[in-house]
Image (tube, rainbow, N blue to C red):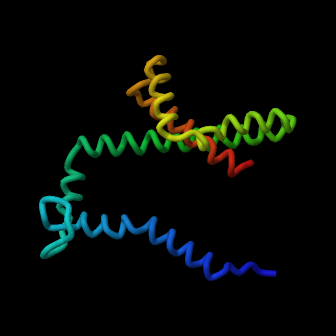
């Protein structure tokens, strides 16, 4: 027996894909403009904005820092989430459910509430505006995803 999605399901999936890809369809041509500001190209395509980006050391350092923090957080979240799922599997159902609910809490709490709570806590702990603080926040926010996947 094979599963065949209904035409409505296919149409909804297509609409979601267009909605998600739409900004990129506009952003890429706008970035190739020959104008000094971002707009659709007038006369010819140009890589001037990319050349300016790659020549600026401030932007390159910011990109490198962002890449390194996100990579560290992704690795830490994956390892911690997988270890948590294996550990929760060995616990009683009651404790496992309680701990899983706590770990999945960042998905349920609105982002602005989490941001304010983490801001207040990070300033008290001295982690505000530090690389370690950014990685820790990314781990907290990203931890539910490997837990869901491996559970």
Residue at 71%, 38% (x, y): give it. Answer: 101
Residue 23 appearing in the image? yes
Q: Is residue 27 left or right of residue 93?
A: left
Q: Is residue 17 above or below residue 38?
A: below
Q: Quadrant of residue 49?
A: bottom left
Q: Position of residue 140 (x, y in %)?
A: 57, 36
Residue shown at the point (61%, 78%) measured from the top left: 8
Q: Is residue 77 visible?
A: no
Number of numbered tags placed on the structure image: 0
Q: Nearer the viewer, residue 60 or 119?
A: 119
Q: Percent x, y for residue 143? A: 61, 41
Image height of 15 relative to 53, above or below: below
Q: Is residue 30 above or below residue 94?
A: below
Tell me where residue 52 appears, x and y as whole percent. 18, 54
Quarter of the image with the N terminus is bottom right
Q: Residue furthest right?
A: 92
Give how far across and how far down residue 70 sits, in percent: 47, 43
Q: Is residue 148 left or right of residue 29?
A: right
Give the residue displayed 66% in from the left and 41% down from the top. Answer: 104
């Amino acid at each position: 027996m094979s599963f065949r999605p209904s035409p409505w399901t296919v149409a909804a999936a297509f609409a979601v894909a267009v909605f998600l890809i739409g900004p990129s369809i506009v952003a890429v041509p706008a970035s190739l403009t020959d104008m000094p500001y971002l707009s659709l190209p007038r006369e010819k395509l140009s890589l001037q904005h990319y050349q300016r980006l790659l020549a600026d050391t401030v932007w390159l350092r910011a990109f490198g820092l962002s890449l390194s923090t996100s990579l560290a957080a992704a690795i830490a979240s994956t390892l911690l989430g997988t270890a948590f799922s294996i550990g929760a599997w060995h616990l009683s159902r009651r404790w496992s459910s309680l701990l899983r609910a706590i770990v999945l809490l960042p998905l349920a709490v609105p982002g602005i509430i989490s941001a304010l709570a983490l801001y207040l806590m990070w300033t008290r702990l001295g982690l505000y505006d530090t690389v370690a603080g950014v990685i820790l926040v990314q781990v907290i926010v990203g931890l539910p995803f490997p837990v869901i996947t491996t559970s």
